[in-house]
Image (cartoon, rainbow, N blue to C red):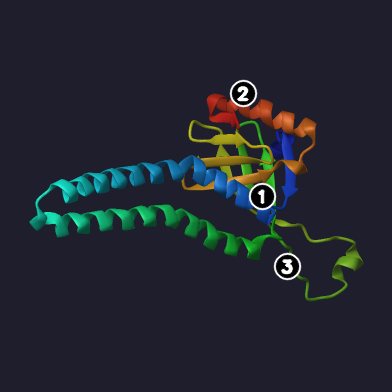
Amino acid sequence: MEEATESLLLEKSYQISYELFRNAFTAFQKRFVYPKTYLVMAVLATVAGIYAYFVINGSEQDRPVYCMVIVICLMLCAFQWYNPRKIRRNLMIAVREIEQDCYRLRLYPDYLEIGTLLPPEQNELAGDDDLFDDSPEEDFSGTRIYHNKNLHVIEYPDFFMIYQTKTMFYAVPKTVFSEQEREIIRVHFSRKLGKNFRQN
């Protein structure tokens, strides 16, 4: 434990506001969800356009089938457009319930730890802490993420986005860091991650 403490580069506790998480999740969707969504929509729109041509220039007997294909393509396009927005809306409703949660980031030379600060258990014997002048320590439930080729960090104007896969990310607000601490983070991730660290 002492060795880990000595190698600790930076430690910061923070909260994530509703607005910041909304901005972070929107940025995450724009980077990883919308490109695929727009590609699928483009394919569906192309298929619908082809069958629209057949409706105009094809045989009258096959027109009902062509129209059905067009309707299906348009419905799928609408679903592709609506689904990411529905996911974001439902997620933001849940975020309201955890907006006051506290998190902690610990930065080490070869990995980082990020997770939730759990409030200490309430002592049933009132006055014990006052008697011994010893407040209970905060519990930390976190994830250790090593600096490897799968780790990516993107610096946005208001937050750092940390992710390993394209389905989950962590947002760390920049306002909790001093400018010197932000520079420590930039230099550290630039050296450890190379092109996997980007400034947006």
The amino acid type of the residue labelled 1 equals Leu
The one nearer the camera, 43 or 174, is 43
The one nearer the camera, 89 or 143, is 89
Residue 48, image x and y in percent?
A: 26, 48
Q: Secondary structure at mark 2?
A: helix
Q: Which residue is mark 3?
A: 121
Q: Which mark is residue 191?
A: 2
Q: How many marks?
A: 3
Question: Could you tell me which quadrant the C terminus lies in?
Answer: top right
The amino acid type of the residue labelled 2 equals Arg
* Disc with the residue nearer the chain's start (2 vs 3): 3
Placement of 187 over or under 75, stated as above or below: above
The residue shown at (20%, 48%) is: 51
* Disc with the residue nearer the chain's start (3 vs 1): 1
State left or right for residue 100 relative to residue 62: right
Q: Quadrant of residue 67?
A: bottom left
Residue 16, image x and y in percent?
A: 68, 52
Q: Residues within 10 Å of mark 1 (few under 14, many from 20)?
A: some
Q: Residues within 10 Å of mark 2 (few under 14, many from 20)?
A: few
The one nearer the camera, 191 or 27, is 27
The amino acid type of the residue labelled 3 equals Glu
Question: Could you tell me which quadrant the N terminus lies in?
Answer: top right
